[in-house]
Amino acid sequence: MNTSILYSDSGSTPRHEVSQPLILHRFSLLLPESATALSVQPSGMSLHFGSGLLRPTLTGFSFSSSAASTPSPVLLRSVNRSSEKCAVCKSAEGATAGAASKVLALLGVGDRSEGSLDIMEDMPEGIEDHYEVVQNRQVRLHTVRIDLSQLPTIPCAYQLQEFVGRVLQVQPEDLLRLQWSRRERCLFLKMRDQLTAELLVGSHSGRHRFPSGNFRPRIALTLEDGTTDVVLHDLSEMVDEEDVQAFLGQYGVVLNITNGRWPCEVRFAGVDNGKLVVRMVIRRPIPRLAYIGGEETLITYEGQPVPRTSLLTSLSYALRRFFGCE
């Protein structure tokens, strides 16, 4: 019983040269004892957990099954974003084709170099929404945002060019557009493809100071078409999803809204915990406190700016985030 899930980049030869380490960086696979080993080959990554074969094609992936059996659950975790959201691919009534079709839906979004960005739990429709958003050009593709809003002064053009070329080591042939936004105080780099953009963010985000110096802020790099899970606290079931969509739509592109669940470690695992999890592409910071549907809610998400308050309040906020109280 062998089901192979193959993942590989279908670009030119230079992209194939970095496909194997990129795959290992982007996917962390936690396999149960009943699953067989993970292997990496020149064609990509192969994972065996049932019966059948999932192959890459020119336009996506195709699945063929040789027998029906019960595959072991496979946990795919995206490690190229700080949020590290997870997706459990389980079979439907023990059908191997059902499990593989979910993996097929997760990996077959857009081009193969951006498939892992869209892995999420039990929400394939959210992934389809993200694909439609990308196709409709509501989100800037292959674009890296360099946030310089923390700087006390606006850098000149020479400083920006030196930072991109000398510090980030961006080559002219990889860069299609370099734009400074005076309104957002951010620098946007449109790269030649998604792979190059992901490598730039993974290699340099939070690792450099600008201008150079020990007391200068570290610069964050993010993907413009990357998604974030925004959590809404303290809302009752009386609040409609339309109200949530209308409010958060002011701050980005809302892809999906789902109810949070208690984790498997507690007695009432899987029961609604009263939180709303909204997957969206954030274009500008969302306020921490807001009124939605006539109710006050606390809004939290990864990468949220720290409130500019007293030192004691900031320390309390950091401790609450560290111990998972928010």
Image: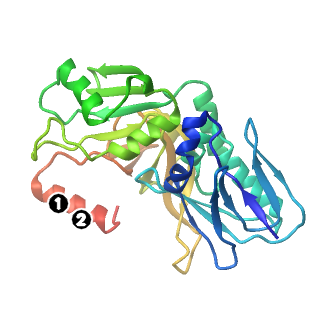
The numbered disc on residue 18 is: none
Look at the numbered disc 2 and give the secondary structure of its residue: helix
Q: Quadrant of residue 323?
A: bottom left
Which residue matches tag 2? 319
- Residue 121 in the image: x percent, y percent? 60, 57
Instruction: Say above or below: 175 vs 50.
Output: above
Task: Give whichever of 212, 233 is nearer the camera.
Answer: 212
Q: Position of residue 182 (x, y in %)?
A: 26, 20
Residue 189, image quadrant: top left
Which residue type carries mark 1?
A: Leu
- The answer to the question of whether label 2 and label 1 lie on touching residues, with beta carbons closer than 8 A, is yes
Q: How many marks?
A: 2
Question: Residue 139: where, in percent of width, then height?
Answer: 51, 29
Query: Is residue 250 among the parts visible in the rendering?
Result: no
Rendering quarter of residue 286: top left
Amino acid type of the residue tagged 2 in the rendering: Leu
Secondary structure category for the residue under label 1: helix
Direction from residue 82 to residue 322 in the image, left or right: left
Q: Quickly name the residue at label 1.
A: 315
**Along the viewing direction, whichever of 237 and 158 lies nearer the viewer:** 158
